Image (spheres, grey):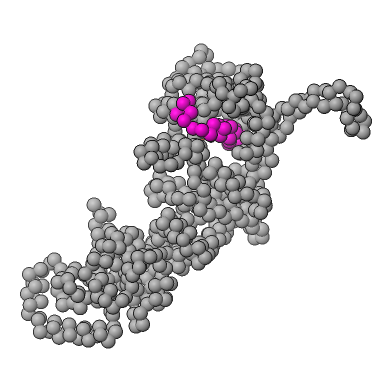
């Protein structure tokens, strides 16, 4: 088959252009990206070989091998993973199909516009731009690959200039070999960074790829004096050269290591790389459990919520491993949906390697793990709320909505989340504008106050301006400001706290029964009686537009206000329903 030329897809070109012109300062991460691809490819083969051993072609020693060549100015990274066939090469190396890379480009545009101080290096880490990062250090890249179980091998080549070539070739071993033709400045004696230097490569592997589960090997030439029969070097003999293959990484997945031995930077690096994040995590949960069910979990709450957290294109889920072997990327059945922002992984010998998604859903072990982890996370959040209010409020700003939706949707789906979550939600107080819990509100209630009052509006200022607020302010009664449309739905689901019902200030009688209030109420009743004729005339005039016309004691200086029927939906819920029906 002759050599064919292809154009990169437009978005790929754009990305390549960024890479080639190396606006990034941290070139060295290309190695981490290529090694992680090699490791993913071996994972895939490993997994598929569990049901089809023939795919291994008799080669069971998984390995990622580095070959630097200073004279030729090349660095070669090869693996014996799954490899790629022709269609996959065109799809995976020629187009940007992955949402991660698309998101990267969008974020880049966004930050350029907003001129935020996000470094480009961080962004590559976040989105795992992966393969294309090779063009940060290479003038051209050659990929030779053969898919396990297939016979045809292919050579892909590109100088990152908008096109690539593809032709058939020979490759006895399955897997992928990537040759980087290093650009000036990336090899040799006066290079800025020398990616043909074995010691530099070794330390890069240690820095970024130590936990990769397969050996990353490189050949070293060792010069030594020959040894005598006791293993001692012979002093007056001439040094001899010997080639030795060394494994550069410790191969121990981070989560299997003892907690106290792991440095905070290691957790952060792992989190960012494994989950395409660029900020530090807000919270890290690392637990090992033995007993009924055995597992290790390493979960994170990301530093900030993704913009699409509440949209259908956001894919929540936890990675699953069994005895350190990857099984599944986004398992939704482990944690409840209100924790959809949690990222991480669970590794358990109790999970079977070739379990289907359907069977997994019913897995008793998975349910048990999920329940334990949920409890753990809630306990940590409760502790945060008690011990570090600022940190909790930061958490709340990012993820509070998720908990509130959880309370409401739990009611809809028959899974009661009220008990679990009611003490974790916060509202703005009408008094000081600060956030408060329901417990705090209940603890500060006036003597004789029976209800928890709340008001809805677009912000606190709007609520402060409501005519109904006047009276409550006068009586020094605190009102919870609900400025998020889901707030009221959550409160509807909670129904009561500490035996006290929630009461919208725009709904029906405020039921304030202190003495002064009773007096006013009495006066009001008398007035109503005396003005019956007027009220009836008004009601007739507004017929069909209002349910009733009443004299009110909830107004101080405003002449009139709209209130809702005691039994009907509150005004803001009506507005929310109206918006949803449009
Ligand atoms: P990601 O790893 O996030 O999917 P990359 O840009 O790093 O994105 O890689 C793109 C795709 O190219 C991979 O998803 C994979 O399908 C394919 N690929 C890259 N390197 C290899 C490799 N060494 N072996 C097999 N497939 C590979
Ligand atoms: Mg990758």
> Could you tell me which residue is drawn at 7 percent across and 70 percent down?
541
The location of residue 367, given as percent across then percent down, is 55, 57
Give the magenta range.
Answer: 18-47
Q: Nearer the viewer, residue 49 or 240?
A: 240
Residue 30 on the magenta span = yes
In the image, farthest residue toward the right: 229
Is residue 152 positioned above or below 15 on the image?
above
> Is residue 91 visible to us here?
no
Residue 299 on the magenta span = no
The location of residue 61, given as percent across then percent down, is 70, 33
In the image, farthest residue toward the front: 190
Left-right relation of 366 to 452 = right
In the image, farthest residue toward the top: 2
Left-right relation of 61 to 108 = right
> Is residue 287 visible to us here?
yes
The location of residue 183, given as percent across then percent down, is 55, 22
> Could you tell me which residue is drawn at 40 percent across and 61 percent down?
404
Q: Main secondary structure of the magenta part?
A: helix
Q: Nearer the viewer, residue 114 or 581?
A: 114
Q: How many marks?
A: 0
Q: Nearer the viewer, residue 49 or 112?
A: 112
The location of residue 454, given as percent across then percent down, is 31, 69
- Where residue 218 sits, quadrant-wise, is top right
> Could you tell me which residue is drawn at 50 percent across and 14 percent down?
3
Left-right relation of 370 to 434 = right
């Amino acid at each position: 088959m002759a050599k064919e030329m292809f154009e990169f897809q437009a978005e790929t070109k754009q990305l390549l252009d960024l890479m080639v012109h190396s606006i990034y300062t941290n070139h060295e991460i290309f190695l981490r990206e290529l090694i992680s691809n090699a490791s993913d490819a071996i994972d895939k083969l490993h997994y598929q070989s569990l049901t089809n051993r023939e795919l291994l072609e008799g080669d069971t020693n998984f390995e990622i091998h580095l070959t630097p060549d200073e004279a030729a100015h090349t660095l070669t990274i090869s693996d014996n993973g799954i490899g790629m066939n022709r269609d996959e090469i065109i799809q995976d190396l020629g187009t940007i199909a992955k949402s991660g890379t698309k998101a990267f480009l969008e974020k880049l545009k966004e930050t350029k516009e907003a001129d935020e101080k996000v470094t480009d290096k961080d962004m590559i880490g976040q989105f795992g731009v992966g393969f294309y990062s090779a063009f940060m250090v290479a003038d051209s890249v050659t990929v030779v690959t053969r898919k396990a179980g297939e016979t045809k091998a292919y050579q892909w080549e590109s100088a990152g200039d908008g096109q690539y070539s593809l032709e058939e070739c020979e490759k006895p071993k399955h897997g992928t070999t990537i040759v980087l033709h290093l650009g000036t400045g990336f090899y040799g004696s006066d290079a800025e960074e020398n990616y043909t230097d074995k010691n530099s490569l070794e330390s890069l592997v240690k820095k970024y790829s130590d936990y990769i589960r397969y050996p990353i090997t490189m050949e070293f030439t060792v010069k030594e004096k020959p040894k005598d029969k006791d293993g001692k070097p012979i002093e007056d003999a001439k040094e001899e050269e010997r080639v030795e293959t060394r494994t550069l990484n410790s191969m121990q997945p981070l989560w299997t290591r003892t907690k106290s031995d792991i440095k905070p930077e290691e957790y952060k690096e792992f989190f960012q790389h494994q989950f395409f994040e660029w900020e530090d995590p807000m919270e890290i949960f690392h637990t090992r459990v033995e007993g009924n069910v055995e597992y290790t979990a390493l979960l994170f709450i990301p530093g900030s919520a993704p913009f699409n957290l509440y949209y259908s294109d956001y894919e929540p889920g936890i990675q699953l491993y069994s005895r350190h072997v990857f099984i599944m990327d986004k398992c939704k059945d482990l944690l409840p949906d209100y924790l959809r922002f949690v990222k991480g992984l669970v590794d358990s010998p109790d999970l079977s390697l070739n379990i289907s998604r359907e069977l997994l859903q019913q897995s008793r072990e998975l349910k048990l793990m999920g329940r334990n982890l949920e409890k753990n996370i809630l306990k940590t959040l409760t502790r945060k709320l008690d011990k570090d209010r600022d940190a909790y409020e930061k958490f709340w700003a990012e993820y509070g909505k998720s908990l509130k939706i959880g309370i409401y949707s739990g009611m809809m789906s028959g899974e009661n989340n009220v008990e679990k979550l009611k003490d974790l939600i916060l509202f703005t107080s009408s008094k000081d504008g600060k956030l408060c819990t329901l417990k705090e509100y209940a603890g500060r209630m006036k003597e004789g106050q029976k209800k928890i009052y709340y008001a809805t509006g677009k912000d606190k200022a709007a609520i402060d301006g409501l005519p109904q607020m006047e009276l409550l302010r006068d009586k020094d009664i605190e009102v919870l400001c609900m400025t998020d449309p889901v707030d009221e739905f959550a409160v509807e689901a909670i129904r009561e706290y500490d035996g006290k019902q929630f009461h919208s200030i725009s709904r029906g009688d405020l039921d304030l029964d202190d003495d002064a209030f009773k007096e006013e109420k009495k006066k009001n009743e008398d007035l109503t009686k005396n003005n019956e004729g007027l009220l009836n005339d008004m009601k007739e005039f507004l017929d069909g537009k209002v349910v009733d016309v009443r004299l009110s004691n909830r107004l101080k200086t405003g002449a009139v206000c709209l209130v809702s029927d005691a039994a009907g939906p509150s005004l803001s819920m009506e507005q929310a329903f109206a918006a949803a029906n449009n």
